[in-house]
Structures are given as C-alpha cells and as structure tokens.
C-alpha cells in the first residue's frame, strides 16, 4: 500500500493538505480540532463572515462533555454552561409530574445548556491552540476526487470585487456544511425523508417568572379533539431569567409570513415551492418574530403570568427529517446535519453530529498518515449511519407522540437521551465478543465507562479512569495481578501492541488494590501503573481475572481480551492499523 504522505502532491510539487473541512459549526470545529490533536494537517473553511450570535442548538448531552474531557477542554464548557436539572410539564395550565434528569453516579457529567455560539467559541479557541483558524467568507464551489485525493475549488469573498478562487488539493474532504450541504449534493447522495407542516419560532429572551432555575418548561394546549394544538418550550440559558423559547407559529403570523414571501417572490408561488428542496432550519426571509409575538404566546401558554424582555434574537424555523444513504464516497465524507436532520426533540442533533466528527477524525488521521487498516474508513458509515437512523426515527416519534412513544423504563430512556447507550457492537473493526464471556461489563463496541478510585504513588488523591485516558489516542488497559510473572506478561503484551501499531497504542496497567509494583522507575514495568484501590475498576469492567481492554480514541472499547493473549490482540489491531 502506498503512503499518502509520500505519493499525493499538488500541481506545484509541494505536499498537499491532509483534510479540508467544510463548515465551521460545532461539528466541523470538532472534526478539525480532533484531527489537529492527532497531528493531521487541516484547513477549515466557512462561507459566513463571522460566527452567528444565535442560541440555536443549546442542549449539551453528558456524552458530549465526556468527549470534550477526552479532548482536553471540558473545563471551559463547564464554566460557560448552566445545568439542566429537569423539565416542568404543563398541559392546559395544569402541572404534570416533572421530569428529573438524574443519571447514575458513575456517569461523570450531567445535562447542560450552552448557546451554540458559545459552543463554537470554545471549540474555535481550542482549535487555535494548534495554530489552525477558520478561513471565513470562503465557500466550496465544487470538487472532484480520484484514487489519490480530492481537488476542491474554493471562492473567497473579496470586498469590492469578484470572489478570489483557489484550487486546493487534499487527501480527504469532510462536509460539515449543514442541511443544505454542498458536499452532500456534490456526492449525489440520497437524502430521503419528509417535512413537518408546522412552522416554529425561536426567541432568546429574559422572563420574570418564579419557576425553579435549571428546569426546562414545556406547556401545551389541547384543542377540541384532545390533541395538542399549541406548544411552548423554554430552555434556560446562562444569565438571569434568560431562556431560549420555542413555540408553534400562530396561524395569524403564519398567514402574514406567507403573504410577505409570496409578494417578495413575485410569482404567486407558495413558500414550499420557492424554498430549497430541504425545508429545514432557520428562515432568513419573511416576518421575524417580535417581542410582542413571543409575549402573545407566553400570555396564552405560560404556567405563570410573565413578562418577556431583552429580546436578543428571534427567527422562524422549519423541521424536516432526512438521512443520507451513505456517509461517504471514496475520500469524501459528510457529518452532522449534512448527513441527518430531524426534530430538535431531546437536543440530539448537534450532539449526534459532534459524535460523527469524533468518530471520523481519528480514522482519517490514521488514513492520512498511511497507517489505517483496509476497512477502517468504511467503518465510519457502518458505525454512524445506524446511529443516525435511530436518532431520526426516535426524534420523529417523540415529536409526534411524545416521549411515552418509547416503552423503555425511564432510567434507560434517560441514558439513551444522554447518548450514553450509543454503541458499535456490529462494527467491522470491533473485536468479536468471547463466546465464553458471561456478559458482565462492557463489551467490544460499547462506551468505555468511567470509574474513580485509581491511585498512583505520586498523587495524594484518587484519580478517575477518564483522567488516565484524557488527551491520549488508543489506550491498552491491562488488568492483572502484581506478581512478577503476571507483570511480565502484561509488559510483553504492551510492547507487542506498540510494535504492531507503530507506537500508536499506549499501555497502562491497572492492578488490584494493595501494595506492589508502583510504576516506571519505581520497581515496576515501563508503563504507567495505577492501583484499583477500592475495586471500582474491577466492578465496572467485570475484570476479576487478567484482562486487556483496548480503548479507542473515541472512547469506545475496540477489544476485550480475556486472557490477554498476543494473538488475539494482533488479530484486532490488523483491522485498525496497516500492519
């Protein structure tokens, strides 16, 4: 196999770019930052001149915070966000049982709210640490790919003149450019689905009600047939009394907007006929909801008398539900809204897109370096498209029928909404489960759970497992006893993993609590050694006997080997690395 870094060159003879990312929203920024964190050369472009100051996607799932922890910047998000403790539910003004967003103690993060522009700011600042900045006012206008790479054509806006055009040669192209993705259209991907007939409006306002802080508010009115005909959803944001309000557009406002759009178009056509084929997202034309429009809905649906003020931003939006038939073709891939769009129920969209980017980035980094196994890039579609299909289906059900449409018990439902149950057990690059396994603990393809209680001789406080995994790539966790023969076998396996992966797999030993080998330079093996002081790791991972856990860069178990045999480890690594 040829090494891309040696063979692919631009017309000038210089080595070309590894990855071009199109779109600088949360998904594109995640892709670029994770690629740069793995040492991959990246450019990221966006057609907008600046970050939009809109509180669009505001819900941050616990799994997303785990990802940001692994990447190394979760503290900035925690300091900027506010907690989401639950949801207050009202039907026809009558309070119903509230929903508490309570997760098990072993989940390190909770639900949070953060305006999308703040999410983008934090990601952009993290990306800048690697010397990479967004190239704004720059649009992808076309691309072609061949066996060795992609030729992309960019147009950069120039004040007072025609756009400046540039041709970029790159190894891979990633489209994170939203529901109307130019990359998806350029690939000719199918994007089947439908649209909801209702229009909705958003408003970022301050309200003076006395409802408990940290709780979202959902208030609905039932019509004559007993079905909801109007709804108000408020999500708390950072700031005193500040909420992102979402509500059904009243009929009178819908009629006014249709008249404005028809008059502006001059053809007499309907809004749907003159709109883009994908009616999803914010509407830049027609009537922008005013504070009085939002107040009128609050007057009807708010569970308390309330006055709204300090309108920062408002818009009307439409909702579609669609999924691409493939997440990539050849050297070009799509992620986020470019691949899947659906109702905002449960704050799944942006968070699912971030996981798309996180899954793809480490694989692209290996591929760009010529180190990826033959099926690694194909596993992006195999792993993420089923997730996209599940999210689209679930959010559509919840939008039409409510959360009760799913028969799961509340605890499981909450874990799924938190995106903690996403897994890849059927992935072609995940090790097969051991037929003799008893089923306890995480399986290959499952999220690697956190635990605490790990000790290290130089730290006077217990560590979390996520502290050990933070800012690392592939990590081989070796659980075993401290006897000399057992440690020697662990060291041999760690050395073999490093050799097969070209040093990409780093090993850590987790030993049962007690005394014994301490670590490198202190009488132990030449790798970090941690003690499972109170047995939390052993319980969480069902590791009663010597076991090897290969944790992928995206925080999922690639393999669980019991006993930790070199042949089994090599079989797994051959699916991931070019060996």
Image: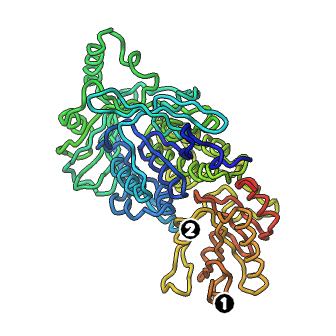
Q: Using the rendered view, name the quadrant where residue 231 is placed.
A: top left
Q: Residues within 10 Å of mark 1 (few under 14, many from 20)?
A: few
Q: Position of residue 426 (x, y in %)?
A: 71, 48
| Residue 485 can be seen in this image | yes
Q: Residues within 10 Å of mark 2 (few under 14, many from 20)?
A: many
Query: Is residue 213 or residue 167 the one in the foreground?
Result: 167
- Mark 2 — residue? 469
Looking at the rendered image, the quarter that the C terminus falls into is bottom right
Q: Which mark is residue 248?
A: none
Instruction: In the displayed orientation, state which residue is furthest to the top.
Output: 267
Q: Secondary structure at mark 2?
A: helix
Q: Using the rendered view, name the quadrant where residue 475 is placed.
A: bottom right
Q: Is residue 319 above or below residue 70?
A: above
How far apart, in angstroms, are the residues tagged by discs 1 and 2? 23 Å
Query: Is residue 144 or residue 288 the one in the foreground?
Result: 144
Mark 1 or mark 2: whose residue is earlier in sequence:
2
The reply, left or right, for residue 143 in relation to residue 518 is left
Q: Using the rendered view, name the quadrant where residue 8 is placed.
A: top right
Q: Position of residue 96 (x, y in %)?
A: 37, 48
Q: Is residue 261 above or below residue 137?
A: above
Query: Is residue 99 or residue 425 the one in the foreground?
Result: 425
Q: Is residue 500 above or below residue 519?
A: above
The reply, left or right, for residue 567 in relation to residue 159 is right
Q: Is residue 448 above or below residue 305?
A: below
- Mark 1 — residue? 523
């Amino acid at each position: 196999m040829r090494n891309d870094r040696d063979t692919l060159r631009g017309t000038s003879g210089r080595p070309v770019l590894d990855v071009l990312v199109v779109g600088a929203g949360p998904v594109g920024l995640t892709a670029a930052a994770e690629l740069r964190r793995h040492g991959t050369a990246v450019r990221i472009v966006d057609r907008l001149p600046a970050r939009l100051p809109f509180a669009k996607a505001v819900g941050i799932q616990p799994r997303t915070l785990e990802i940001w922890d692994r990447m190394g910047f979760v503290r900035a998000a925690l300091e900027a966000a506010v907690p989401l403790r639950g949801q207050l539910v009202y039907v026809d003004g009558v309070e119903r049982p509230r929903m508490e967003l309570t997760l098990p103690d072993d989940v390190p993060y909770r639900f949070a709210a953060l305006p999308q522009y703040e999410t983008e700011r934090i990601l952009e600042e993290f990306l800048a640490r690697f010397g990479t900045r967004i190239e704004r006012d720059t649009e992808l206008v076309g691309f072609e790919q061949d066996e060795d790479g992609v030729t992309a054509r960019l147009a950069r806006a120039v004040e007072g003149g025609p756009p400046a055009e540039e041709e970029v040669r790159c190894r891979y192209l990633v489209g994170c450019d939203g529901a109307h993705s130019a990359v998806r259209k350029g690939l000719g991907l199918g994007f089947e689905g439908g649209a909801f007939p209702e229009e909705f409006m958003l408003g970022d306002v301050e309200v003076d009600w006395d409802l408990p802080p940290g709780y979202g508010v959902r208030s609905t009115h039932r019509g004559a047939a007993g079905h909801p005909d109007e709804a108000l959803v408020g999500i708390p944001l950072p700031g005193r009394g500040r909420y992102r309000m979402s509500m059904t557009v009243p009929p009178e406002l819908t009629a006014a907007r249709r008249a404005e759009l028809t008059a502006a178009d001059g053809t007499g056509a309907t809004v749907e006929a003159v709109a883009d084929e994908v009616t999803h997202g914010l509407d830049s034309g027609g009537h922008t909801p005013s504070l009085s429009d939002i107040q009128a809905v609050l007057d009807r649906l708010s569970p308390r008398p309330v006055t709204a003020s300090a309108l920062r931003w408002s818009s009307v939006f439409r909702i579609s539900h669609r999924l691409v038939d493939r997440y990539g073709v050849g050297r070009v891939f799509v992620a986020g809204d470019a691949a899947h769009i659906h109702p905002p129920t449960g704050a799944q969209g942006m968070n699912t897109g971030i996981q798309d980017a996180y899954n793809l980035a480490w694989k692209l980094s290996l591929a760009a370096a010529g180190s990826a196994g033959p099926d690694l890039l194909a596993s992006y579609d195999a792993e993420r498209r089923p997730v996209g299909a599940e999210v689209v289906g679930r959010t559509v059900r919840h939008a039409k029928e409510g959360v009760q449409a799913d028969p799961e018990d509340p605890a499981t439902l909450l874990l799924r909404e938190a995106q903690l149950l996403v897994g890849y057990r059927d992935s072609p690059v995940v090790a097969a489960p051991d037929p003799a396994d008893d089923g306890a603990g995480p399986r290959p393809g499952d999220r690697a759970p956190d635990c605490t209680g790990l000790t290290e001789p130089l730290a006077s406080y217990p560590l979390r497992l996520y502290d050990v995994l933070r800012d690392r790539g592939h990590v081989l966790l070796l659980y075993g006893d401290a006897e000399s023969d057992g440690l020697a076998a662990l060291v041999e396996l760690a050395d073999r993993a490093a050799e097969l992966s070209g040093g990409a797999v780093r090993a850590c030993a987790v030993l049962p609590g007690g005394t014994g080998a301490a670590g490198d330079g202190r009488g132990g093996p030449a790798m970090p050694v941690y003690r499972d002081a109170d047995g939390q790791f052993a319980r969480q991972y069902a590791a009663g006997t010597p076991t090897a856990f290969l944790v992928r860069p995206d925080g999922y178990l690639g393999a669980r080997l019991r006993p930790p045999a070199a042949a089994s480890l090599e079989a797994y690594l051959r699916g991931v690395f070019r060996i």
